[in-house]
Image (cartoon, rainbow, N blue to C red):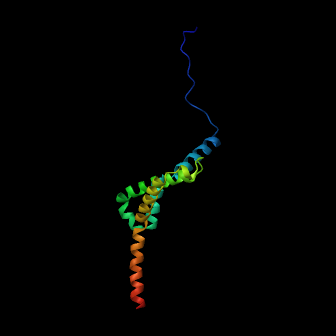
Amino acid sequence: MSTEPATLPSPDVTLPRHLFLKIVTLIKDHETTRTKPEDAAIRLFEACAPENQQLRDSLRPVVLQWLEVTDWFMRKAHDSGKVDADCDGNEFRRQFELFELALGALVRGFFATVEGLDEILEDANS
């Protein structure tokens, strides 16, 4: 048995330059295109109702609820080997009601705008 300490390999790894550049490009592309689901949902809510841009902080709980509900439905929609009868009807209704609430919060500003537009059109046509 040797009493000399074992030599550790060098922490430096040498790569060909072209391989290094490909790895750097891949990592950079991944970082720039990767979007958090929360950020994507906020952009959706803001695109559907631009007034939501000023409400970003108060919109966050609605966005988180939206993500939870859509994740629940995604898990149900993709084949997990379970049949429809395995889904609890009460839980399905509860999740759908939460979905409707979140969707209502998403488009609430749009419908307010439509109501205003309807009033203008009604006045113009009378």
Residue 124 can be seen, yes or no = yes
Tell me if 27 is positioned left or right of 101 in this view.
Answer: right
- Compared across the picture, whether 9 is left or right of 38 comes to right
Left or right relative to 100: residue 80: right
Q: Is residue 74 above or below residue 5?
A: below
Task: Write down the quadrant of residue 6 in the picture.
Answer: top right
Q: Count how many numbered circles sit on residues in the image.
A: 0
Q: Nearer the viewer, residue 39 or 77?
A: 77
Q: Nearer the viewer, residue 27 or 39?
A: 39
Q: Position of residue 42 (x, y in %)?
A: 44, 59
Q: Compared with residue 122, is residue 101 higher up or lower down, i.e. above or below?
A: above
Residue under the point 56% across and 19% down:
7
Residue farthest bottom in this picture: 126
- Quarter assignment of residue 110: bottom left
Q: Residue at x 46, y 60 (%)?
A: 43
Instruction: Point out residue 124 in the picture as x, y percentages from the top left corner.
Output: 41, 89
Give the residue drawn at x 41%, y 62%.
Answer: 101
**Depth check: 72 or 24 in front?**
72
Identify the residue shown where x is 62% and y is 36%: 15
Q: Camera-side residue: 38 or 74?
A: 74
Residue 2 picture location, percent across and down: 57, 9
Up/down of 18 relative to 117, above or below: above
Quadrant where the N terminus sits is top right
Is any part of residue 33 visible from this angle? no
Q: Position of residue 105 (x, y in %)?
A: 40, 64
Q: Quadrant of the C terminus?
A: bottom left
